[in-house]
Amino acid sequence: MSYGILLWGHAADTEIIFVLQKMAIRAIYNLKPKESLRQIFKKINILILAFQYIYENVMYVHKNKSSFTNISDIHSVNTRNRHKLIVPVTLLHRVSNSFLGRVIRFYKKIPENIQNLTCSKFKNFIKLSLYKKGYYKVKEFMDDNNPWE
């Protein structure tokens, strides 16, 4: 399910995969069709599709930070936001919603002190935080303004 998720995770048909994932969990644990699985996913530590997609995106940016443009690359003024990544700005909606635009927007949701962690600590922190928050959809992640712990 996670193969190539960086590229296809934003596709329209991913909802079908999530429904199939929920059906499989209901069958394995003998749960009723209308029973909520949000707490079950947390309890059994299964990575739901949205979790995997968000996780892979932020890990991709963290591992390849040097490939992205920072504010400090654009101008030499020493501001507090100099380390923030820049989303490509174009007139075409298609480009701003492309793979690069999405991964940067996901990464910008993570506080700067967490972004500065080493790769292994960052990986563990992101996994634990995403498990705690239990996002069912990518939109929940993007709309969440609660602080990271």
Image: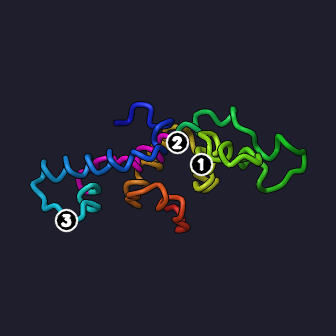
From this viewpoint, is residue 104 visible? yes
Q: Give the alpha-carbon distance from disc 3 to disc 1, as whole Å.
A: 33 Å
Disc 3 designates what residue? Answer: 35
- Which residue type does callout 3 highlight? Glu
Task: Residue at the far bottom: name it.
Answer: 146
Q: Is residue 138 left or right of residue 26?
A: right
Q: 148 above or below 23?
A: below
Tell me the element at label 1: helix
From this viewpoint, is residue 85 visible? no
Q: Quadrant of the N terminus?
A: top left
- Which residue type does callout 1 highlight? Tyr
For the residues labelled 2 and 1, say whether their Cβ atoms are less than 8 Å apart: yes
Disc 2 designates what residue? Answer: 57
Q: Is residue 84 left or right of residue 109?
A: right
Residue for point 59% across, 44% down: 103
Disc 1 designates what residue? Answer: 107
The answer to which of 98 and 144 lies nearer the viewer is 98
Task: Residue at the far right: name it.
Answer: 76
In the image, residue 75 lies in the stretch drawn in magenta: no
Residue 56 locus on image (x, y percent): 48, 40
Q: How is the image coloured?
A: rainbow
In this picture, which residue range is highlighted in magenta? 43-58
Residue 78 locus on image (x, y percent): 86, 51
Residue 65 locus on image (x, y percent): 65, 37
The answer to which of 16 and 5 lies nearer the viewer is 16
Q: Give the alpha-carbon distance from disc 2 to disc 1, as whole Å.
A: 8 Å
Mark positioned earlier in the residue sequence (2 or 3) = 3
Tell me the element at label 3: loop
Q: Give the alpha-carbon distance from disc 2 to disc 3, as whole Å.
A: 30 Å
For the residues labelled 2 and 3, say whether their Cβ atoms are less than 8 Å apart: no
Disc ID at residue 4? none
